[in-house]
Image (cartoon, grey):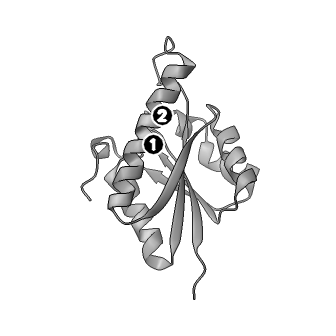
Amino acid sequence: MASVRRYLVVGNQTLRSARLLREMRSCASRAPARFHLIVPAEKPHGQASSTETEARTKSHERLDAALVDFSVAALAVDGEVGDHNVLDAVRDALERDGYDEIILSTLPPGLSRWIHADLAHRLRRRFALPVRHVVVPFEDLAPPAA
């Protein structure tokens, strides 16, 4: 029996995209897979006045909606809201569980702070795991159809 591959999925605004869903389904089609979503509790870009509580609430809403989408798509998935610092959120998850790969889901260049910060490269270097970078086109941000 094939072992289960474990993926740590890091996303925020792009979690409910059809592009990310296709990527996760593709991973699950190759071997049994489990996915753990991390949604950093960061304040939305351009909303410096929002509080940490508001940021966590928004992140929980995104996580809950994504968990429903992926469960409907018959994917084995769970998740959490993590630290507002993405690298710290990933480190915390990796300290609790082992993963085979990180899937980073971002907005496209020009819109993504994570691309601007070279997050995919920083994750690879810091955690020595393969990182699959899924760039979600702006027009693909609507919730996917299962």
Q: Amino acid at mark 1?
A: Leu
Outermost residue, bottom side? 1
Q: Quadrant of residue 6?
A: bottom right
Can the viewer see residue 56?
yes
Label 2 crowding class (10 Å Cα cut-off): few <14, some 14-19, many 20+?
many
- The disc placed on residue 99 is none
Left or right: 65, with 123 as reference point: left
Alpha carbon distance from label 2 to label 1: 6 Å
Question: Where in the figure is residue 124, as x and y percent of width and height?
Answer: 68, 54
Q: In this rendering, is residue 111 above or below 120?
A: above
Is residue 107 in sight in this rendering?
Answer: no
Which label was assigned to residue 59?
A: 2
| Residue 39 percent across, percent down from the top left | 53, 41
Question: What residue would you read off at disc 1?
Answer: 63
Quadrant of the drawing holding the N terminus: bottom right
Circles 2 and 1: CB distance less than 8 Å?
yes
Per the image, label 1 sits on a secondary structure element best described as: helix
In the displayed structure, would residue 143 be above or below residue 73?
above
Please state if 71 lies on the left or on the right of 34 as rendered. Answer: left
Comparing 131 with 51, the one in front is 51
Whole-percent x, y for residue 85 in the image: 65, 33
Q: Nearer the viewer, residue 111 or 10?
A: 10
Which sits in the foreground, 28 or 79? Answer: 79
Instruction: Please tell me whether mark 2 sits on a helix, a strand or a loop.
Output: helix
Residue 104 location (% of width, % of height): 53, 50
The residue under the point 65% across, 62% down is 99
Which residue is at the far left?
145
Residue type pointed to by label 2 = Ser
Q: Quadrant of the C terminus?
A: bottom left
Please tell me which residue is depicted at 61% across the width and 62% down the height of the picture: 101
